[in-house]
Image: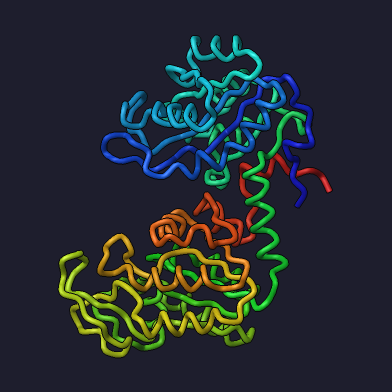
Amino acid sequence: MKLQEIKNIDIDGKRVFIRCDFNVPMDEYNNITDDRRIRSALNTIRYCIDRDCSIILASHFGRPKEPGEEKFSLKPVAKRLHTLLKQDIKMAKNVVDEDTLEMAKNLQSGEIMLLENLRYEAGEKANESEFAKKLASMAEIYINDAFGVSHRAHASVEAITKYFDIEHKAAGFLLAKEIKFFHNIVENPKRPFVSIVGGSKVSGKLEVLHNLITKVDKILIGGGMAFTFLKAQGYEVGKSLVEDDLIPEALKIIDEAKELGVKLYLPVDVVAAEAFDAEAIAKLVTTQEIPENWMGLDIGPATAQLFRLALGDANTILWNGPMGVYEMEKFAKGSTRISNAVAQSYATTVVGGGDTADLVRVTGDEEDMTFISTGGGASLELIEGKVLPGVKALVLEE
């Protein structure tokens, strides 16, 4: 898959619309607690500044229920961009009203404006062409640098691309890097290739598991989703999270792994608790001995050691999903141990998904990972082998 990239089109002195992903975590006082996604967009923005472009930045933030909901404003993002770029950021009052369109028209070379939250407009999620047309009218060039939302057919990601030909639209540096990385890792990994899959549910990762089984040498399953597999093998798992309707699928994946000679690892011990509660009484048990009314909320130390040994000879590690309820300190040890093991390995390590990216930041292992993806759902769909709606229009004819 060959992408049209920003470096291969003529943007000098032009008005450029960049779709970014500034959906960053904020505390209750609207202070940004992690600006990684903003910093990830800087390469593309600076490239446009250096080429005397006038720049319109656009992003969604959260899920506002109504237009203009103050707690979902992008003003804190404008402030952080000002700090990082050391230049003024013109903050639009809205998304596509007359005054915003006028402001975009009057932008000078090197100036940057940030539109208000795209999701203030219903047309964004509805992928409405009329709304997309207004967004497109602001610029001569369209750049998608928002990998995290490229799996969604939204107006600023998909419909807008119809108003630019292939010489006037392209992938930004971040999007191109993410696509190339995942494509290479899944299609041409250095072996042994080991995948760690966690998170709460099998349903969200079913296609991923089916696709990975045909590509990896080993697969390590942790998190809540492991209990569906354990129950499928006849274990009593108490009140642990289980998707009973997916037990046949879990068995199919286990059989497929056997057929293909892929080693599939499941937890051998868990930290179980009486309730889903940070204060609940917890104890370490083997997977054969989970008490009837208890639930497994983390992998135990023996599983962490087993997984560490399985990772020992890996040359490529792809990790998506935590090993337990890492937001509660009592149930974060398993995820932390795996994070440390991945960080200490000599493999190419790729972390995909918002929760896993957040986890490696909390454990302090961020710097030791080869690549941390900015998109959870988007990276899963790439692993599934899908062409993302936001990327499709940027693919060059072979």
Towards the viewer: 56 or 231: 56
User: In this picture, is 115 found above or below 380?
Assistant: above
Residue 132 picture location, percent across and down: 57, 26
Q: How many marks?
A: 0
- Position of 301 with respect to 6 (left or right) is left
| Relative side of 180 to 330, left or right | right
The residue sitting at 56% across, 41% down in the picture is 153
- Image spot of residue 203 (x, y percent): 44, 65
Q: Quadrant of residue 51?
A: top right
Q: Residue at x 41, y 29 (%)?
A: 74
Does residue 47 sit above or below 369 in this rendering?
above
At 60% from the left and 69% from the top, the residue drawn is 211
Instruction: Give the colour scheme of this rendering.
Output: rainbow
Residue 290: image x %, image y %? Answer: 25, 84
* Residue farthest right in this picture: 398
In the displayed structure, 340 sits above or below 42; it is: below
The percent coordinates of residue 343 (x first, y second) are 51, 68
- The residue under the point 60% across, 13% down is 107
Q: Is residue 165 above or below residue 234?
A: above
